[in-house]
Image (cartoon, helix red, strand yellow):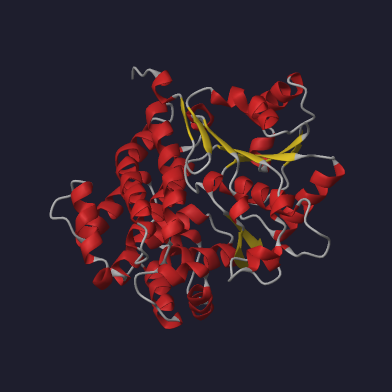
Amino acid sequence: MSLDINHFSTGWNYPAQILTGAGRIRELPGACQALGMKAPLLITDPGLAGLPMVSDIRAACHEAGLAIDVFSEIKGNPTGKNVLDGVAAFREGGHDGVIAFGGGSGLDAAKAVALMAHQREGLSLWSLEDIGDNWKHADAAAIVPVVAVPTTAGTGSEVGRASVITDEVEHVKRIIFHPGMVPSTVILDPELTVGLPPSITASTGMDALSHCLEAWCSPNYHPMAEGIAVEGMRRICHYLPRAFLHGDDLEARMNMLVASMMGATAFQRGLGAMHALAHPLGALYDAHHGTLNAILMPYVLRANECAIGEPMVRLGRYLDLRQPGTAAVIDWVLELRERLGIPHTLAALDIDTRQAEKVGQMAVVDPSSGSNPIAFDAQAYQRIFVNAVEGRL
């Protein structure tokens, strides 16, 4: 396909400074220097750490006079220990800023390291869990600057004010929040996502959809987030199948990066039962977050059906679905999942119902449950979970 890649080369300042376009990764050293960094710590996952793209970044930073180092001891569902180890590496290396590089796990861990790097001794990461005004315990001036570079199009963590970190002692995912966690500069370079396997393209893309869709269904008042969410879903509808089938389609890759960022911006309006269930399931079974959301999606839509009729009609019209409404949106989700090779049940991830009661109890207290269109109790969450395991839609 013929594409003028310069069409996407631009810059925005919402919700942070965003540099978009193919090849913009070359501007990373300058972006670090503009934030006063002289010795950034690049934080990424082990799978990316050994790839040429990271070697190229290190070489470019060294050439620009930056004393860069790499920390990559991060799990797919990052843990509190991963963050503490990252903070230790940051301090021992005398670093003054963070490059958050990778998918959601790398970005979330990196932002948490930047948050904790210079906080006072004795302040626990868990004391900054997104409950009430916990974030005020942190010293905002102690948060070090972050340049975020996503290599997947899913979480949108590059523009998020929070990190999802697993408490490995309690086996629960906790949302660590502070308004100052938003990276100062974001680089969206579609060339960095070209090598993603189709399966990762699919699961991360469906994660972006879950953010947009749950924000769209939230009952909270935030018209700007509504508009961003629905346009994000239109882009995912159009571009995710293209990116899945043709990994080198830069137009599709660029638009999926944007849609991912739009989802994370939109869910300021709130999330819902998909995430309320995906968080405990990720903690209990160490399953991929995007895949969990993708599987749970139609089951949650069905459970919320009586409360989301009007927004589903509007969404169906925007996506040009036949006979717009909840049934049409569910059918669209099912068709999209099938095209992307996403399984229909949680059983396909080796998840059974033995911990159903515990899952329901964990979901009802997850922060995401507070903005679901229906205030489900633990038993209702348990039923949705069992349905998703057994395939009862």
Check the image and name the residue furthest to the right. 92
Q: Residue at x 65, y 55 (%)?
A: 78
* One can see residue 312 in this view: yes
Question: Residue 247: where, in percent of width, then height?
Answer: 43, 30
Q: Is residue 390 left or right of residue 154?
A: left
Q: Is residue 30 above or below residue 304?
A: above
The image quadrant of residue 267 is: bottom left
Q: Residue furthest left?
A: 323
Residue 299 image position (x, y, % from top left) = 34, 66
Residue 385 coordinates in the image, percent (x, y) = 42, 71
Q: Is residue 376 above or below residue 130?
A: below
Quadrant for the C terminus in the image? bottom left
- Give the residue at x 39% y 67%: 388
Q: Is residue 19 left or right of residue 107?
A: left
Tell me: 218 left or right of 193: left
- Image position of 311 (left or right of 38): left
Does residue 175 lie above or below 59 as drawn?
A: below
Please tell me in which quadrant of the rendered image residue 324 appears. bottom left
Q: Residue at x 59, y 70 (%)?
A: 131
Q: Quadrant of residue 287?
A: bottom right
Coordinates of residue 96 in the picture (x, y in percent): 77, 39
Instruction: Depth check: give the residue in front, 197 or 180.
Output: 180
Q: Nearer the viewer, residue 63 or 173?
A: 63
